Amino acid sequence: MAFSDLFARRRKDGHDAADGPVHPTMVLDRFLAGLSGRPQPVLLDLGPVVGSNVTFFGEQVGCKIIVEDLSKDIDRHVSQGKLEELSLFFDTRFPQESETIDGILCWDVFDYLDRPAGERLARQLKRVLRPDGVLLAFFSTTDPRSTIHPMYTKHVVVDRSHLQYRPYAAARAKQRPLLNRDIQRLFEPLRITENFLLKTNLREVLFRKPAAAAQAKPAAAGS
């Protein structure tokens, strides 16, 4: 049974009401299309482990999934009073070699980072992403001060067009929203191929690393 079929059955039975609301996603299908046709692509997921997501991506694109839950890193730095060290921590957080990842699921992790930490994280993600690789990220557009209790969101894939949002406690609140131009600058030289602002005040952005990036390294070395 496909996961989407199983989810539909649970909804009819009324067992998923407390799990979280379901919302449309405009970019997930395009993200999957960016991975299709690649032999055994490698996917990096920056959210918590979600078993059904692992199954979904494995069935859809036959990929290997590496989960690096950054919410735990953020919470640990907050609880230890070392939040100012988070940006430097990202410099050595990812053991993956350069240009070895085909797709990256950032979800909304950048909402919880200040500018220095966000820049350091983006730098590492751009490093590990293969030329022509794709990166998906969500950005809130609302004032985080309206949230009383800090919460993370576990993004559970329902199907290629829908995600279920499951909130869970966070040690740090969301930071000031990034403007569209700041998002673009943060991920340069990646190109924005899709950019949607949803009714939920969430911006979904799909990036692609230019294939020309593979040729830039030898040219720089010889200069």
Image (spheres, rainbow, N blue to C red):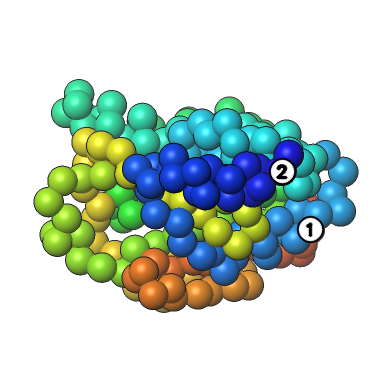
Answer left or right for 137 relative to 28.
left
Please give left or right for residue 97 compared with residue 72 in the image. right
Residue at 33% across / 54% down in the picture? 111
Q: Is residue 200 above or below residue 150?
A: below
Residue labelled with disc 2:
2
How many tags in the picture? 2
Is 165 positioned to the left or the right of 105 in the image? Answer: left
Residue shown at the point (51%, 65%) measured from the top left? 24
Q: Quadrant of the C terminus?
A: bottom right
Residue 215 marker:
1
Out of 178 and 62, give the one closest to the viewer. Answer: 62
| Apparent side of residue 89 relative to residue 156 in the rendered image (left or right) | left
Which of disc 1 and disc 2 is earlier in sequence?
2
Few, some or many C-alpha atoms within 10 Å of disc 1 (few <14, some 14-19, many ≥20)? few
Tags 2 and 1 in contact by the CB under 8 Å rule?
no
Please state which of the two labelled residues, at mark 2 or mark 1, is closer to the viewer. Answer: 2
Q: Is residue 12 above or below residue 210?
A: above
Q: How far separated are the C-alphas under marks 2 and 1?
A: 41 Å
Where, by quadrant of the figure, is residue 169 drawn?
top left
Q: Looking at the rendering, which quadrant does residue 82 occupy?
A: top left
- Residue at 57 percent of width and 31 percent of height: 51
Residue 37 visible in the current orientation: yes
Which amino acid is tagged 1? Gln
Residue 59 in percent (x, y) is at: 76, 41
Query: Seen from this angle, which residue lies furthest top?
Result: 80
Residue 31 disc label: none
Residue 19, horizontal then vertical, whole percent: 39, 42
Q: Amino acid at mark 2?
A: Ala
Circle 2 Cα neighbour tier, 10 Å, few/some/many (<14 / 14–19 / ≥20):
few
Please identify the quarter of the rendering in which residue 67 is found: top right
